[in-house]
Every structure is written in structure tokens, then in C-alpha cells.
Amino acid sequence: MKLWNKKVAGATILTMSMLLGACNGTDKETTDTKDGDTSEKKVEIVYASGVDVTGATDKLIAAFEEKNPNITVKRQEMPADTGASHDQYVTTFSSQSAEIDVFDADVIWPAEFAQAQYALELDRFIEADGINMDDYFPGTVQSGNFNGRQYAMPKYTDAGLLFYRKDIVETPPKTWDELFDMASELKGKEGTEFGYLMQANQYEGLVCNAVEFIAAYGGQVVDENNEVVVNTPETVAGITKMVEFVNSDFVPSNILSFQETETNNAWVGGQSVFARNWPYMQSTSEDKEASKVAGNVGFAVLPSGDDTNAATLGGWMSMINRYSENQEAAWEFVKFMSGPEGQKISAVEGGRAPTIASLYEDEEVKEAAVLFSNEEFVATLQNAVPRPVSPIYPVISDIMQVELSKALAKDITPEEAAKNMQDKIVAAMAE
Ligand code: GLC
């Protein structure tokens, strides 16, 4: 049976490689076996992706390799900080290097990478394999689409969540003010040191946390018409609340250096009553070997401000380097990771939220993580607030990071931060 499969797979790949060879000159070598059988030579592709504390990535690769014996995936680990990864990719791709074949892309990158011509258009592959993009959450597909072409396939989606200790908190807070009071009061219970953990370091995660505060108080950065609308009393109210949290006595004294990793480590170490993080922390929380809080973790939507409650839309996609010399094999891997089987592994092993709606009906997915059978959570994912979609997003983000950091350190007021962001983003977009 196995041999038969191998031969069929080999023949299919061979046909594809012949076609590809005819199309773009990327000819793949074949090996003649002793009995005259011709089978595909092994192809190695390099897959770059960020540090994965859940271990799901290795399982994804193993499952893919088992199904595709002719393709070996070599993992290249990128920094956990999305901004640092981004800068490394830009350096590599702007030199037209073929070193990386497939890479994970933060939802904020595809527009920029498409415009800079770093990424391969995927439409011909999607069509040839009959992939129905309507199976995916529309927002996640849009993040990978630029000028009508699909450059990235959705892998998983993210939305900010409030994690709380069920052994300390009876009912999670509904508003940011309630959270503030509960974090002050409850810190110290059950051996905790902190009331709340968040991401306040000067990096992309800071923008994600800020967008949640800003939207909760009715503010926005860029509106539907692509106008910069960040200098409003609503935004100021959101930033003011964030400054209060960061300067409270219930967050770690080094909260200004906290990213997701620091948050996760302190959380699974049992150090805090509440924390803001992405869904994957449900998986690390329940890892009985590494977590002191397994069995005691609850989740809620982030609290409301004066206006509503809001979660920032995050998530990751898969893209192919335009200069990859193994485009067919690269696509096979992208297709696997972003397809139902790959997304299921990410969900079950890594607690990552699928972008394929039907997976929320899958019994194994539902069983693996309580979040996935929670309707409120699925609604949060679908209503999450995107960051500005723009090929110059990194510039916008840098401006926000600098101004927000100054406000959190109380070097400038929230009013000044809002005004500076407005002026600088408008100027950057005009260039
Ligand atoms: C998560 C999100 C991503 C975001 C990043 C910020 O990885 O999925 O979209 O940019 O966190 O740190």
C-alpha cells in the first residue's frame, strides 16, 4: 500500500515538476531507480517562522513530511518579536535571496510584502487545487489580499483575550475600571505577585494593546476611508486608561519590557491574577508539566471602556518567497498548513484559533480547547479590530510605538501622544 502511494505521489509530483519546468525553467532533478522506475528526488524547503512555545510547529512539519515523503522541511526559527522578524525578512527578501521558501507572515505584512514584490502570488495554485476561499473567515482572507490578488493563506487568527485565575476570581470584570479595582484588590491571593499582565514594551504588541484601549473608548487610528482620525477625545481617553494600568502598583515594575513571552512565563508561573494575551496561552496554561496554573484558568472578552469592548485582530498567514526555487513544494506545504488538517494540528496542539469556520464544529478541536466551543469567543474573533491596512504599516506602527511609549513613561501627556500620532501618520501617508 505504502509503495503504491509513493509511486502515485511521485508520478503526480513528477508531472507537476515537468509542467513547472516548462513554465519557468525551474527543473527538478529525478532519480532513476534500478528497476527503471523514475521517482522524484527529495526536495528540501526552508520554512521560516517565529519561536513557538506550544510545540505545534514541529508537529505540523512532521505530519506534512509523513504525507509528502519527497519534501523535507527545514525549519528556520525567527525571533518571537514580530517586528524583529519583519526586519530580518526585509533584509533577506530585498536582496532577492532564495534562501527561504515558505514563511509565516503577521497579518499586518502581506500588503507591504506584495507591493515590495517579495511574495509570490498564490492565485494560480489556489485555482489549480480548487481551494474555496469562502471556507475561511473573510477578514483573514482580506489580510492576505492586495490589489485583488491573494499573496498569503490564513493559518490562524488571533484576538486579544482576558485570562483570569478561576481559583481567585468568581466573575470576570466587565469594564476596564472594574478590572483595575479587582487587580488592585486581588493581587497577592494564592501566591500571586501581580494583578495584571499586558504587553507594554515598545514593539508591535504595544500597538495591539493600545488599539484595544482606544477602541473600547470609541477611538480609531485610521477610518474606513483611510483618513487618520486618531486625535480625538475618545483616543485620549483610551490612552489615559492604558497609562493608568501601566503606572499602577499591580503590574510588574518592569512592565515596559513585557512582550508576549514575558507575559506567558509570568502567567504560567502563577504570578498574576489577570493577563491579556492571545489565545495560544490557553494551551501553555494547561500544559501540566510547565504550568503552575493548569485547571485554574478562565477566559473572558477584554473589558469595555465608555463605548464598547474590543479585541485587536492578529494572526498569522503563510507566504512563499517570490525567489524560491522550490515553488511547487513550497505551495504543497502552505496548502497543508493553511488547510483543514494543518489548522487542526495548530488548534489542538497549539491552542491557535482556526480561520476555517467549519473547524469550530470539529469535535476534536472543540475538545482540545474550551475556547473553541465558546460562541462569545468565536464572535470576538469575527469582530476583532484590524490595525491600519497599508503598505506603509510599519511606519505607522513605529510612530505609534514611539508616541505611546512616551505617554506610558509619562514623558508626554495622552493628548500630546494623540496629536503627535495624528500629525506624523498624516505626514507619512502623504509621502
Ligand atoms: C501576535 C499576533 C500578531 C501581532 C503580534 C504582536 O503574534 O498574531 O498579529 O502583530 O502578536 O506582538
Image (cartoon, helix red, strand yellow):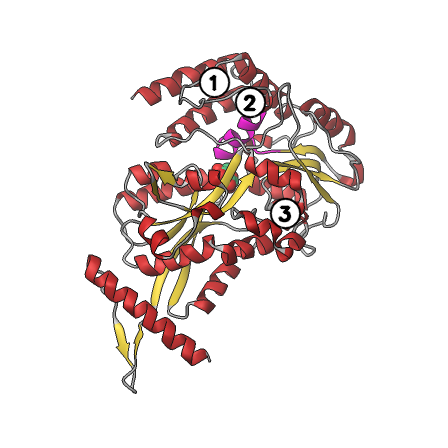
Read off the magenta span: 198-214
- Residue 201 appears in the rendering: no
Please tell me in which quadrant of the rendered image residue 158 appears. Answer: top right
Q: Amino acid at mark 1?
A: Val
Q: Is residue 145 magenta?
A: no
Please give the name of the residue rendered at 23% of the width and 61% of the height, measured from the top-left corner: 26
Vertical position of residue 309 compared to residue 410: above or below: below
How many discs appear? 3
Q: Nearer the viewer, residue 340 or 415?
A: 340
Q: Are marks 1 and 2 in contact (CB under 8 Å)?
A: yes
Q: Residue furthest bottom?
A: 35
The part of the image, by quadrant, that contains residue 299 is: top right
Amino acid beneath label 3: Phe
Q: In percent of the image, x 30 and y 44: which residue is there?
A: 118
23 relative to 205 in the view: left or right: left
Q: Earlier in the sequence, mark 1 or mark 3?
A: 1
Residue 371 position, x and y percent, is: 65, 45
Nearer the viewer's eye, disc 1 or disc 3? 3
Side (left or right) of 408 relative to 142: right
Spatial distance from mark 1 to mark 2, Cα to Cα?
Answer: 9 Å
Q: Say whether marks 1 and 3 touch (CB < 8 Å).
A: no
The residue that label 3 is drawn on is 372
CA gap, disc 1 to disc 3? 33 Å
- Left or right of 322? Residue 137 is right
Q: Is mark 2 within 8 Å of ligand 1?
A: no
Per the image, the residue denoted by label 1 is 230
Q: Looking at numbered disc 2 in the image, what kind of residue is underneath it? A: Ile
Residue 234 position, x and y percent, is 56, 15
Q: Which residue is mark 2?
A: 214
Under circle 2, the secondary element is helix
- Between 277 and 246, the one lying in front of the other is 277
